[in-house]
Amino acid sequence: MLTLSKYIEDNEAPFFNSINYVPFNDSNFVDMLNEWCKFNHGSLQIRPLIEDALKTDADVIRKRVTNLINVRKYKYSKLYDTTLLKYNPIENYSMTEEGTDTTSASGTKTDDLGAYSDTTGGIDTRTITDSKTEKIGAYEDANTSTTSNDISKLTTTTNNVTTDNGSETHERKVAPFDSDTYSEQELNTDTFENRRNVTDTETIVSPHIDTTTKRDTTTGGSRENSYTTITTDGFQHGMKHDISSRSNLYTDESRGTTTHKLTRSGNIGVTTSQQMLESERDIAMFNFIGIVAHDIIKSICICIY
């Protein structure tokens, strides 16, 4: 005879290996479920048919319980969710109202301003000042000029005057008509003092061109040239406005959105607060693990204590 306690002790996961929904996928809940079955229903006997089936299939109980929990998923999920609700136990009325209000308004307004006449005039004077500065670097100015003179043939005569003392001998020779031999005919000797001798010297220069080249160089450092131009002018103007009538038109349009949320809760009077407290105490006795364990026991055990 195999008891439930013995079966749980011999199997690490006695009822199921894996369930994919809350709270059966929580290892802490599974441990509490195993302990609950062991200590509260451990003396119960496993059904003989199931015990015999364990000899050939060690997973027969796990398969049976897994199928049971999956089939009753909706029941267990809803029951478990009720254990998580938060509420005031002495309130039986709770209402939340949410809404959005949209408002819009528009209007027009006209102001009559009457006729209008305006004459304006005057003289406008304008002065424009324009300043300009030029920066000039170092400079060097070089001027070269060439002069050529065409000179024709030039003859220059120089008179040299000398004075000397001495004598001169003049000899005259003649030859007969029938002879080539000359014979002295006459010999004269002249003595002189302070005789003035004039000698003319002529200098001749051939035609030529004289070329003269002249270069003037001026250098200077960097400098600035500043210019300021002031221009003043004026003009006379006049303008006249004649308006027979005028008005201002104002248009106003506005839109608004208001979101509101209203929450109401309390006791509407159909149940007293004491009755609601008593019901809350009954709910406190609710044992979700006990309900699941009871369904498992009924499926695999002989429920006779």
Image (cartoon, rainbow, N blue to C red):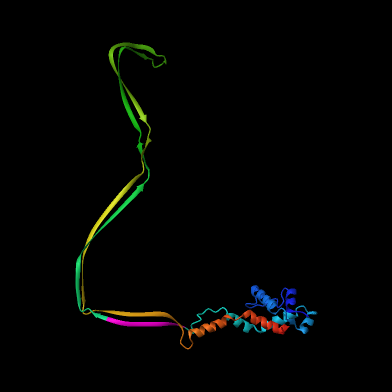
Q: Quadrant of residue 145?
A: top left
Query: At x 37% / y 80%, what residue is drawn?
Result: 255
Kindly give the residue lying farthest to the front in the view shown.
Answer: 305
Q: Is residue 104 magenta?
A: yes
Q: Position of residue 86 (x, y in %)?
A: 53, 78
Q: Which quadrant holds the C terminus?
A: bottom right
Q: Quadrant of residue 35?
A: bottom right
Q: 290 above or below 270? A: above
Foreground of the two, 113 or 50: 50
Residue 70 lies left or right of residue 257; in this view the side is: right
Q: Is residue 208 magenta?
A: no
Q: Which quadrant holds the N terminus?
A: bottom right
Which region shows up in magenta? 95-109
Query: At x 55% / y 81%, what residue is drawn?
Result: 281
Q: Position of residue 5 (x, y in %)?
A: 73, 77
Q: Quadrant of residue 241?
A: bottom left
Foreground of the two, 188 or 221: 221
Q: Position of residue 27 (x, y in %)?
A: 65, 73
Kindly give the residue lying farthest to the bottom in the view shown.
Answer: 270
Foreground of the two, 137 or 84: 84
Residue 183 lies left or right of residue 124; in this view the side is: right
Q: Position of residue 234 (x, y in %)?
A: 22, 61
Query: Which secondary structure type mostly characterizes the magenta part of the structure?
Result: strand
Q: How many marks?
A: 0
Foreground of the two, 135 or 147: 135
